[in-house]
Amino acid sequence: MSTLTLRRRPLVLRRLPGLQGLGGFLLRRMVSAVATLLAITVIVYAVFYIVPGNVAQITCGERCSPAQVHQVAAQLHLDDPVYQRYWDFLRGIVAGRSFSTGTSIEHCAAPCLGLSYRSDQQVTELITAKLPVTGSLALGSLVIYLLLGVGTGLLAAWRRGRVSERLLTGLTLAGTATPVFVIGLLLMIVVCGQLQWLPFPQYVPLTEDPEQWAWNLLLPWTSLALIEAAKYARVTRAAILETLAEDHVRTFRAYGLSERSVLGRHALRGALAPVIALAANDFGSMFGGAVLTETLFGLPGIGQALVSAVNVADLPVVVGMVLVTGFFVVLANLVADVLYAVADRRVVLV
Amino acid sequence: MSLVEVHGLTVEYDTTRAVDDLSFSLNKGAALGLVGESGSGKSTVAAALLGLHRGTGARVTGSLLVAGTDVQRATDEELRGLRGARAAMVFQDPLSSLDPYYAVGNQIAEVYRRHTRAGRRAARERALQVLDQVGIPDAARRARMRPHEFSGGMRQRALIAMAMACEPELLIADEPTTALDVTVQAQILDLLHSLREDTGMGLLLVTHDVGVAAESVDDVLVMRSGRAVERGPINTVLRTPAESYTRELLGAVPRVDAPTAPRAAITGDALLTATGLRRDFGRGRRSVTAVDGVSLTLHRGETLGIVGESGSGKTTLGRMLVGLLGPTAGTLAHGAERPRVQMVFQDPVASLNPRRSIGESIADPLRAQGEREGARLRARVGDLLQRVGLDPAHYDRYPHEFSGGQRQRVGIARALAPSPDLIVCDEPVSSLDVTTQAQVIALLAEIQQDLGLALVFIAHDLAVVRQVSDRVAVMKEGSVVEYGTVEEVYGAPRDPYTQRLLAAVPTLDPVVATERRTARRALTPTW
Amino acid sequence: GPKDKDEGAKGTPHKGGTLTILNTEAQTDFDPARLYTSGGGNVPSLVFRTLTTRNRANGAAGSKVVPDLATDLGTPSKNATVWTYTLKKGIKYEDGSPITSADIKYGIERSFAAELSGGAPYLRDWLVGGAGYPGPYKDKKGLDSIETPDARTIVFHLNKPEGEFPFLATQTQFTPVPRSKDDGTKYENHPLSSGPYRVISNENDGEHLVLERNRYWSAANDTQRKSYPDRIDVRSGLDSAVINQRLSASQGTDAAAVTTDTNLGPAELAKISGDKSLAARVGTGHFGYTNYLAFNPKVKPFDNPKVREAIAYAIDRSSVINAVGGTSLAEPATTFLPNQEAFGYTPYDPFPAGKSGNPKKAREVLAEAGYKHGITLTLTHANQDPEAGPEIATAVQDALKKAGITVKLRGLEINQYRDAYKDVKAEPGFFLARWGADWPSGGPFLAPIFDGRQVVKDGANFNHAQLDDPAVNKEIDAINKLTDLNAAAKRWGALDKRISAQALDVPLFHPVYKRLYGKDVKNIVISNWTGVLDVSQVAVK
Amino acid sequence: MSEALLPTGPVADELQPLPASGGRQFLRRLRSQPATLVAAGIVVLLIVVALAAPLLTALEGQDPTTYHPHLVDSARGGVPVGPLGGISAEHWLGVEPQTGRDLFARLVYGARVSLGVAFAATFVQLVIGLAVGLGAGLGSGWLDQILSRITDIIIALPLMIMALAVLAIVPPSFPRPVLVAVIIGLIAWGSTAKIVRAHTITLKQLDHVAAARLSGWNTWHIARRELLPALAAPVITYGALLIPLNITVEAALSFLGVGVKPPTPSWGQMITSANVWYQAAPQYLLFPAGALFVTVLSMTVFGDGIRTALDPRAASRLRIGTGRRREAKA
Ligand SMILES: Nc1ncnc2c1ncn2[C@@H]1O[C@H](COP(=O)(O)OP(=O)(O)OP(=O)(O)O)[C@@H](O)[C@H]1O
Ligand SMILES: Nc1ncnc2c1ncn2[C@@H]1O[C@H](COP(=O)(O)OP(=O)(O)OP(=O)(O)O)[C@@H](O)[C@H]1O
Ligand SMILES: [Mg+2]
Ligand SMILES: [Mg+2]
């Protein structure tokens, strides 16, 4: 740009009147979120309807007679046409449903996601039981990988171009490049088995014993964090470098601020918005995504339950859980957008 | 003793020598203007004064003495002590020069605390004080706002406030008004003037706009390619320039008061008639009416100038005229035949596809019309290139190999390619240097003469519009507030807004500038 | 396994402490009606007592059936179609109320309810009127074929002679359930205990189960269960590698931990074999189980017995055994019946393949079958299943290659695999299969696989060969009449040998169970019935 | 993230449209980053190794499926006989426990599958993401709405679960590596679409696109001639970052038992089964895990490098700052 002076003008910024439209934005997003979730249930219902696996036979046991299998199928309403079953499912969410336990009638209050074919438990109860586990896992690892990732990113931005930065980048990438079941198992063997620093993870509810809760989850958190941190380090570093290239950073340098406060106060602040958005996104998807970690560490969370429900073709559980995880992803995306706008007030929500 | 003493300053970036053996000095309390074309090294000099090149890979030689600090030899810590405290800088772009994430008051306080041992509260008070000083009304409330809640002019005031916070001996202002509208520009220049009167600080004003310098400084230094061309008191340099380059530069500056060549009366028939054009953006509470009830008629062979400040709806109107935007309300009628319309875009960088050779870009509309034959296309594009003063052999070159002015010519050639009846030029010269600007304007006039097409010439610069137009429409907040021939609008403006605009245009005569400054105070509110 | 009989016997067992059980699979459906166990199961047997039970003894002695709630193994009628049992005196539930024969009858009846499906098929097949009975929720009248003339007597009327009825009576369906306490599908959360432990909590369908001592259980009328620990904590959902890691580290509560479902894998075995102290904490057991290659002779070219024989000659058992973990985790099988006396094991090898296959002989036989230049076959297996998975399939593939048999693998998702091989219409011609005993006897081993009357046309079929040989059917009936189990065993062995001549399957191996236990665990008992350490016997103090 | 979902949203902020400068500057900037060049070299080497797998194994004289029962100790769980997991002149990297299959052969054949699956999956993701993102960015209000909602749905569906389901539906005769690639591609294109849409919306506001419209071209032509070339850069860059991610996704699917099927080796599958052998036969885990690590590392460095080289501000960025010692180079 050596031969021209760009007359830049406040075009974009003038178009952004801030957060005033939050209510309308939320309303619109709610509607689209409901539509998205509805579509998800249809897809999951359809897909898992086609998936092979004779639920009645699995439930009844492998050596049940055809007649018994038939009875079980009737009991589980498997003989109803799909649309009927889907309709009942939807109605259950809005109005609740009733089920027979054999000796009495059990009411499953709205929002009722149905009963598990396998365990006769209400899917909503099942989810409420598992959600704290997955939530704890997601939340704790979020904190660790944010600290780890943003810290590394900041350090990498500071030491950009030097050997120490390359080393840091390599180290975080080592985490990304190793599947969680390898990192997790090795960590467990070393930290719990040989060094005996931590107990072998076992879920203890937060409400029961906060200290044990954290102590037991520390390892799963760390394993997940090691895998995620690299991404955050990269985003943070890129965003900081981006901000460093911006004019306002030049202003503060020209006003005598030290490199440290420029980086720590101004550049980092500018990098936070994308990091927050990414974190909210990951937080959401972790509700449906931490299958491997949960399996490895024996944490009875949503991911693990979902995989085993898929294995036994337990449709109500699968649909219910995908719905809930989808809900969290959608919610997290929404929160991400709002946070993004809060972090960077220049952004308007549309 | 002088405030700034520069000797043999040379700054080299890895491939370019931006400043070449430059020497000058500035006395305490004096004001020096640094003028020159884009790329002449003005900003580089300004940055060098604060040692901002340190550690960036640029090679700086020569001696620099600023407010008692030897910038070349100072330690990093000493340098930081100079920056912002004894010598403060105001940057060109007020929009991006403040941190968007922190309240304006806090940013000023942060700088103040960096240089004084002031406590949090004292720093905040100082911030309010300087904000008040630069004329921000209701400073206590505004100080808590973030930059994006400020208008452009207010932001520039805030930046000046930040500069004033530590009562520097030297203020370096690098194009402080380039990004602002004329009326706001006038206010900022007035502010700088009064601050200087009040505090007695020295001012180094960097600008490519000679008019701006004329309004604000005592001495001027004209630069070209990193070297000083001419230096002297502003009156002398402007009235009797010693160097031919300075004369050239001054000659190219369009003036609102210069005599214009008489233009032929409009004879053509009506091409387009717009009635009650209106365009809204967005929905609901946040909707903006960019253009509101504009009616005008375009005749074959005439030039309609559209002026107005940023955001007044000029581009939106232009885009509606060519059909890139549909109007929300109103009609656009044409004569018997639908006129062929084209557009020359404001930004010569974005208006050409960087991945295609300029020849292909120019041939694009022809291809769209169904012309596929390679040789014929090439010949026609060659003609067009020649027409706009480029070498036909440049067909296969890419946009980045051209200067801004050349790119704008390519844009004009592309607009001409399908032989349009009307070309809407959206700020075709606002990003160009005065010299290039003059060339492009001449080119457009010539083409219009030869081909007899209608032009809509959009600009924020009143002088430029006056030079090229037959008729002028002045826009404000989406509406046309004044519409008439050049003589009517410029000679006897009826609308107070037009009057204000005209009063804000910088003049090249420092004496007139002073008079106008007084007049402005009567005409406008404080800001 | 008797060789490591006295490993866990170091130190005398004492009462007290908490036994932790670390498992992969949750103890789902903890309802006696819904459980499908062999001999009453391991954890279930701590809570549910049955009419009879397995003998809690090491090795072969553990294959015997012994009385539990009943005073003896039952009195059969002359042709073994009516079985009468008398309950012991003073047996009580966890709430102190007495256990009656009516409760046992009700417990069996409710296992017929569709809501409580899951158990073994024998009651349905054997009891008079069992096939059509919908359970007590739909049919309040109950099953006439079970009589309870008084509170301590219960009489079963069977369709046909069944000399092995005492074995059946070990299954959890014979657990007493008082009608007043039955709340259908919810019963599993708090089943009424008749055993030494009662359920304190059952989280998420058996994911975490806590058992504590049942005050009303008395060792005086239960000779089998030891009940040393005060408390038993069953945790599941753990990765198998993690379980073994925890057991070998044996720290904290893991020192008093065992697993009831996780074997040592080959890698762990390789590591443990070099560590004396760890090796001392491995329990080895044999369960009546056979992994084999199954044929469907209705599918070409498996209709040709020579093709099947060629495969039997070509098979390389040592590489198959390596695939499942080597010689310490599996023993080569040439007989369909498990290599245990209780099953009537009679050694034979109709198509000797040696340790690593006899490709030469296989080629000859194949040539006789008309495939001089080799043949291409498809082997169906499950995608993820340690016993019918790709590991074994590829080993088979590699072995048959040497005999000129090209094997294409067709891996199915586990549900698809199960659906396919049990459906006579979709049954593949050649696939991996396995069979385990519901109790240690030839009956439940051979009958479902080779009894012509058990070919199920529109449901789950296990008679892969769809064999309907009148002679075989007749012999099965004849043996079922015997109430002398030793005599029966001999004839099951002979029948096995006779069927094997038809090459309807190729036995591959009998698995061996190796399991680690924590360093504080004492009194290790591993019977041949279950092949795994019996949690009712262990002590942690 | 290797766990389940691919990065979404803000990654877009990392990417910039191709600068106006041509390929020459790009190459110059690329060349000025030695790390990127080394990474590129490794990537090329990996591809060559994968392509030349039959050749390499022929050189070694082994193949990836033949069992060598005598090379493993059956009594000790099938641990390879000999030091270092049976490394010898015949078996360059030793043999696999339990089967005795040649590890080197499995590793290089595994590279084929792992890289092939990752490349193909990335390709599918990019193609769908491009189509949907372009459609949403360019289309009228309702088309944008529909496509954006579909994108939301895709992002909200748990990858692993859908993969489990779809893999169970498709007949087993369908070639598994292709299937795995297609499934990853089909389920995980959401983030690509979002990025492409964002870029398209920015790009379509550029004046040269408006100029094309004024010239009379239709939307399709504009998408093809004006937008696609500009999108190529961010998309390729993003793709370079997706590839390593997809390798780990395949590994994760293998862990759940739905990756490619034996005896076809893949790194993911090897790592999964080697996971427990870390003590008894460490080289069994080390080689595939090391290969995966090197691949991911070099792919990421390479992707980052491309991005930096494509970013016109990268060059000027080096010039900003008051860092003392560092002297920037061109
Ligand atoms: N960071 C840099 N790296 C390389 N070259 C640079 C850099 N900054 C400026 N230049 C070059 O140095 C020369 C002088 O630039 P400078 O910004 O000082 O000009 P200017 O007179 O302020 O122009 P303008 O009016 O456009 O602001 C130009 O050729 C420019 O391209
Ligand atoms: N695409 C759009 N969406 C929303 N608002 C818009 C859009 N385009 C223009 N506006 C708004 O319409 C008004 C007029 O804009 P327009 O670009 O026409 O002004 P202008 O006079 O050309 O300004 P400038 O001199 O800065 O180019 C402004 O308030 C602007 O924010
Ligand atoms: Mg400048
Ligand atoms: Mg405009």
Image (spheres, coloured by chain):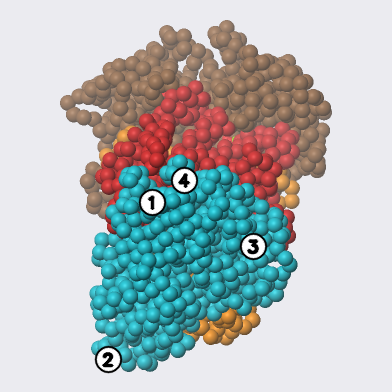
Chain colours: A red, B brown, C cyan, D orange
Number of the front mark, 2 or 1? 1
Q: Amino acid at mark 4?
A: Pro
Sooner in the amino-acid sequence: mark 2 or mark 1: 1
Find ligand 2 in the image and state its quadrant: top left
Percent coordinates x, y for residue C134 in the rendering = 32, 49
Chain letter of the residue carrying label 1: C
Residue closer to the observer: B522 or A278 = A278
Residue A117 to residue C1: above or below? above
> CA gap, disc 4 to disc 2?
64 Å
Q: Which residue is mark 4?
A: C178
- The numbered dot on residue C109 is 1
Asked which quadrant contains residue C428, the reply is bottom left
Q: Which mark is residue B7?
A: none
Q: CA distance from mark 4 to mark 3?
A: 30 Å
* Earlier sequence position, callout 2 versus callout 3: 2
Q: Would you name the residue on which mark 3 appears?
A: C538
The Cα–Cα distance between marks 2 and 3, rounded to whole angstroms, is 57 Å
